[in-house]
Image (spheres, rainbow, N blue to C red):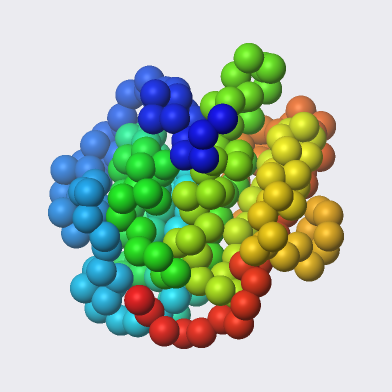
Amino acid sequence: MTDTIRSDIRTYVLRTGRLSKLQKNAILTLSESFIIPFREELLNYRTIFGNNNPVITEIGFGMGDATAEIADNNRDKNYIGIEVHTPGVGKLLSRIDKLKLSNLKIINYDAVQVIRSMIPLDSLFGVHIFFPDPWPKKKHIKRRLIQKTFINDLLPKIKKGGYIYAATDWENYADQILKVFKEFTELYNPSESYTKGIGWRPDTSFERKGIEKNHTIREIWVEKKGRLTNEIS
Ligand SMILES: C[S@@+](CC[C@H](N)C(=O)[O-])C[C@H]1O[C@@H](n2cnc3c(N)ncnc32)[C@H](O)[C@@H]1O
């Protein structure tokens, strides 16, 4: 296995689904203000947000309800949500507008490429990955987002003392996540195993579907070793 994720393997399937009128309208009228187009060029957070606040990225925000709520509750932090599902992008744009969130932007593109091409080294204060696609079939496991190759790309982008916060309702994926994180000596898991009591994460729509199926929710929180500084690179 090579140490970079293979570019021909996608971690998602583009779900079809009609855009609602609200989502379509949000995309037409709000994209220019809140969507950062994909470019092979590093982001300048100061230019994007107009401040030096810590930056957190969320990968695969789905319909974005939890994303908007977290950004609303933490106006002193900046958020970049990355998602390929266009109806979810439309929905989150409308939430950004309704809540007047100046600390949340969206990149509508494959996160694997966004992390690789757009996120500067040592720049992220945190990374949220809530209920990544589980790819439960054995033949599809290689499509899971959280695997060694991806974390290899992601880790240099996280500041020392920064965190990765993942949650899943698939036991076997939760075990994989713990195992992958353990392979990186730069990562420290304060709970040693699954995390209890983070408390501030709002429920997500995929989480609710998992709970309806009687799945147990497992959360994993790891930190990049070293002391956190507030400098923005
Ligand atoms: C199972 S859903 C969970 C959505 C949301 N976090 C929730 O809990 O409701 C996973 C989401 O990740 C998105 N996704 C998967 N791989 C991605 C990638 N490489 N880049 C961007 N989004 C991705 C999918 O489009 C999907 O919306």
Residue ID at (37%, 38%) = 110
Q: Position of residue 166 (x, y in %)?
A: 64, 51
Q: Residue furthest front?
A: 2
Q: Position of residue 178 (x, y in %)?
A: 75, 47
Q: Nearer the viewer, residue 163 or 70?
A: 163
Q: Nearer the viewer, residue 5 or 200?
A: 5
Instruction: Using the rendered image of the protein, determine whether residue 167 is visible from the camera's viewpoint.
Output: yes
Residue ID at (62%, 67%) = 224
Q: Position of residue 209 (x, y in %)?
A: 66, 33
Q: Nearer the viewer, residue 77 or 163?
A: 163
Side of 95 relative to 44 (left or right): right
Residue 82 sits above or below residue 140 on the image: below
Q: Quadrant of residue 90?
A: top left
Indicate the quadrant containing the N terminus: top left, top right, bottom left or bottom right.
top right
Number of on-image labels: 0
Side of 192 relative to 134 (left or right): right
Indicate the quadrant containing the C terminus: top left, top right, bottom left or bottom right.
bottom left
Side of 146 relative to 111 (left or right): right
Residue ID at (36%, 59%) = 119
Residue 126 sits above or below residue 9 on the image: below
Instruction: Using the rendered image of the protein, determine whether residue 133 is visible from the camera's viewpoint.
Output: no
Side of 198 relative to 66 (left or right): right
Residue 18 sits above or below residue 112 on the image: above
Q: Quadrant of residue 177?
A: top right
Q: Quadrant of residue 213?
A: top right
Q: Position of residue 150 (x, y in %)?
A: 52, 43
Residue ID at (19%, 59%) = 33
